[in-house]
Image (cartoon, helix red, strand yellow):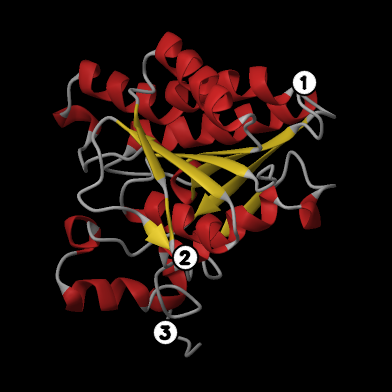
Amino acid sequence: MTDTRQVVVVTGGTRGVGAGIARSFLAAGARVVICARRPPDEPVEEAGETAEFRPLDLRDAEAARVFFDEVAAAHGKVDSLVNNAGGTPFGLLAASSPARQSKIIELNLLAPLHASLGAYEMMRHQEGGGSITMIGSVSGTRPSPGSAAYGAAKAGLENLAGTMAVEWAPAVRVNTVVLGLARTESAALHYGDEEGIAQVARTVPLGRLADPSDVGDACVFLASDRAKYISGAALRLHGGGERPAFLAAASVNH
């Protein structure tokens, strides 16, 4: 019997937000392929299904092209790509080398470009086309002290997605999930201990950090037929954003 399930690729899907995205697609009944430079510490599983891992360094454009050729050969198609791989350590610009900043931009902007080009070559020839979702960041929509190159790359990523949505229509839809503060296994590196995480969560109007499953649910929606007329969009997934600092500083009770 022919397997008609969607085939979804999630970059950086071995841990954190990426693993959460992969699990959401597994729960929705998709066949999921995750890629990263190193395998996951434990299998990424949900609903009795396990994501397939394939090693890939997305900074290598040719390796990305070959990767999508191999996925399409193994599964017959690539329905959806979620460009999740990325990230950055904290570091002020003046205290960081140009080479380090270049690597951050390479990982967060050029790598998604390489993956998208590889996926597009598969999607544009198949019936029904496909969808690409970029995992952006609020760091790309506001000043981002301590992660300047990351913020610049994420701003570029959202612009790139909008251009792809125009150039690759109608075969391929391209959207961005603009993610706010999220809680993963590495949250302590960014926000401190449990009390620090709780204090940060209180700055979010909805009162908590995003869970990886929240991001996964948004990605499943954007890849589905329920979103078949959505392309070039930027979905703000930030729990209401950030309460303006001046309100806390003002003497008037808000």
Q: Nearer the viewer, mark 1 or mark 2?
A: 2
Identify the residue at the far bottom of this view: 253
Other-residue count near label 1 (Cα within 10 Å), few / some / many at <14 / 14–19 / ≥20? few
The residue sitting at 21% across, 43% down in the picture is 90
Q: CA distance from mark 1 to mark 3?
A: 51 Å
Looking at the rendered structure, the number of numbered marks drawn on it comes to 3
Q: Residues within 10 Å of mark 3 (few under 14, many from 20)?
A: few
The single residue placed furthest to the front in the displayed view is: 1
For label 2, the residue is 213
Is the C-beta separation of discs 1 and 3 under 8 Å?
A: no
Q: Nearer the viewer, residue 5 or 239?
A: 5
Residue under the point 18% across and 76% down? 194
69 or 136: nearer the eye?
69
The N terminus lies in quadrant: top right
Residue 251 badge: 3
Instruction: For residue 192, say whether it is visible.
Output: yes
Residue named by callout 1: 167
> On screen, 233 above or below 28?
above
Identify the residue at horizontal 28%, vertical 77% (top origin). 199
Q: What amino acid type is highlighted by mark number 1?
A: Glu
Q: CA distance from mark 2 to mark 3?
A: 38 Å
Q: CA distance from mark 1 to mark 2?
A: 31 Å
Q: Earlier in the sequence, mark 1 or mark 3?
A: 1
Does residue 242 sit above or below 92 in this rendering?
below
- The residue at the point 66 percent across, 37 percent down is 79
Amino acid carrying mark 3 in the image:
Ser
Answer with the quarter of the image where residue 132 lies.
top right
Q: Does residue 85 appear anywhere in the picture?
A: no
Q: Viewer-nearest of labels 1 and 3?
A: 1
Secondary structure state at the residue bearing disc 1: helix
Residue type at the position of mark 2: Ser
Q: Residue 166: x percent and y percent?
A: 79, 26
